[in-house]
Image: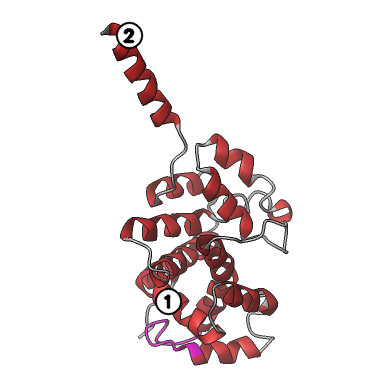
Amino acid sequence: MARDLRLTWSALQVVESAPMKLNLARAGELLATTTSDPHLIVHATNVRGCMEAFARHFGQPPEEVEHWGAVGYLHDYDYERFPEEHLEHTEAELLAEGVDAADVRAILSHGWGICNDVTPETDLEKSLFCADELSGLVWAAALMRPTGISDLEPKSVVKKFKDKKFAAGCNRDVIRKGAELVGLDLPAAIAVCIDGMKPYAAETGLLPKT
């Protein structure tokens, strides 16, 4: 009987120490250890919202909607500390923190063709690649409007997309590639991001100004 109890306790220890999928609480804890720049926090929140919307688009259950959002929130884990070495310090640190290897790979994959060669393969990874750059364009377009994101339409963002001087830091080629990865045309991908970002307008400065 004592031997059986020891075996049971050992099994519980293995389960408790095993990496687990990210949730929002854990993602928030981890990001808080590396990131304090308000702009990066806003970006993390925008990408979280987009990822939640992409999860719904791909028919994920509620628990996965949170999971996808958590991956989005944590995706720039090392950027504030190492902007010139982005994602080079992410893998070892997050694995050491007990983050599931699949989630770490997903985070790394948003740097595909930009700062690494980790190809997005799953719907989650493809969505993160799409959301990272596209959310910046949507946010910039909404920020200019007196009504914020409340009544922003995809066609307005497409118009800004065509103006290369607007939000010039948003890479149009990466945005196009991201939309292709998720199997949507640009207006449809924008619509998903708008839908995901609206609930967080108060946190990201996109509420109506009047």
Label 2 CA crowd tier, 10 Å (few <14, some 14–19, many 20+): few
Label 1 CA crowd tier, 10 Å (few <14, some 14–19, many 20+): many
Residue sitting at 56 percent across and 35 percent down? 96
Please name the residue that numbered disc 1 is placed on: 206
Badge 2 amino acid: Arg
Residue 127 screen position, x and y as percent: 53, 67
Q: Which contiguous range is marked in magenta?
A: 143-154
Residue 204 screen position, x and y as percent: 44, 69
The residue furthest top is 2
Please report whichever mark, 2 or 1, sits nearer to the chain's N-terminal start.
2
Residue 69 screen position, x and y as percent: 43, 59
Q: Is residue 54 left or right of residue 125?
A: left
Q: Quadrant of residue 199?
A: bottom left
At mark 1, the secondary structure is loop
- Residue 149 magenta-highlighted: yes
Q: Is residue 27 left or right of residue 62?
A: right
Please name the residue that numbered disc 2 is placed on: 3
Of helix, strand and loop, which mostly describes the magenta segment? loop
Q: Quadrant of residue 153?
A: bottom left
- Residue 196 magenta-highlighted: no
Residue sitting at 33 percent across and 61 percent down? 61
Image quarter (top left, top right, bottom left or bottom right) of the C terminus: bottom left
Q: Would you say residue 143 is visible in this rendering?
A: no
Image quarter (top left, top right, bottom left or bottom right) of the N terminus: top left
Whether pointer 2 and pointer 1 mark residues with C-beta atoms closer than 8 Å, the reply is no
